[in-house]
Image (spheres, rainbow, N blue to C red):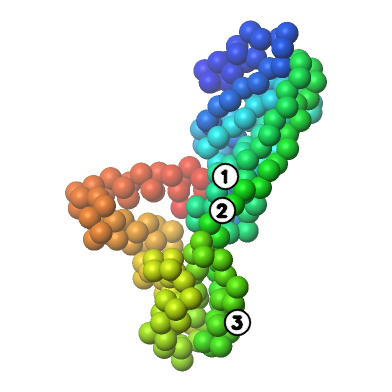
Amino acid sequence: ESRKEQVQHLAETNTKVCNILVTHTGIKEAPVGPSDMIIEAGALSVDDFTGFDLVIAGHYHTSRILYSSDRKTKILIPGSPMKLSYGEREERKGVYLIEALSGGVEPTVEFIPIGSPQFHLIQIESLEEMEEALEGFPACTYTRVVCKSDTIDPNDVKKLLQSKLEEGRFAVEYDTPGVHQSRLGIESKDSLSTVLDKFSGLMVEQKRIESQDKERLLKLGQEYLGRTGNG
């Protein structure tokens, strides 16, 4: 409640000019990620911003424009200006130009696309399919290849990727019936808790965290999954 009260206090202190709030917070009505997950824990609602002409909210990487229930407050989530992961491969990225006039007049918001690294997911059943898929790829590209057939030699896949793409800009995974093998050794039957355990183990192996910190990371991850209903 204290955050809601602080937001409302800010809205009430500036009523004569275009009232804009720039904040870094989660918003309940904003789906995130490729699966459009809703994260309500610790987030504010669109109607908590009543009184502002425009709210610019950071935190989420996916850009969206929302409105309060009375349609008087526009809420812009600009998202990340560049693609940062495979989960964002289908998203458009760029910046926003905002023109704000006076209080009570809805600010105009114009999206301007900018260049960004590209992330591609390719599913193949033969090397020939991959050669066709890689044709015309720009230099600044990250590619994940999922092999749908266990007859494909992984060394051949890597050689072809090395000939087409820069070192470090690709990954190879194998997805045969019943089992999905990834860089973490994750299988399709694994629960999110098991995925979290494997991920934290990899962090220790790569010396990104100390072994004694693994349990703390697991606990924090479990708490997060519980709050988002994905445990």
Q: Quick one: 49 or 81, which is closer to the camera?
A: 81
Residue linked to disc 1 = 81
Residue drawn at (23%, 47%) of the image? 213
Residue linked to disc 2 = 116
Element marked by disc 1:
loop
Q: Does label 2 or label 1 sit earlier along the sequence? A: 1
Badge 2 vs badge 1, beta-carbon distance below 8 Å: yes
Q: Quick one: 58 or 189, which is closer to the camera?
A: 58
Q: Quadrant of residue 153?
A: bottom left
Amino acid type of the residue that numbered disc 3 sits on in the rendered structure: Glu
The CA span between labels 2 and 3 is: 23 Å
Residue linked to disc 3 = 132
State whether residue 182 is above or below residue 63: below
Q: Is residue 180 visible?
A: no
Dot 1 alpha-carbon crowd within 10 angstroms: few under 14, some 14 to 19, many 20 or more: some
Q: Is residue 104 visible?
A: yes
Dot 3 alpha-carbon crowd within 10 angstroms: few under 14, some 14 to 19, many 20 or more: few
Amino acid type of the residue that numbered disc 2 sits on in the rendered structure: Ser
State whether residue 34 is above or below residue 137: above
For residue 6, side relative to residue 222 (left or right): right
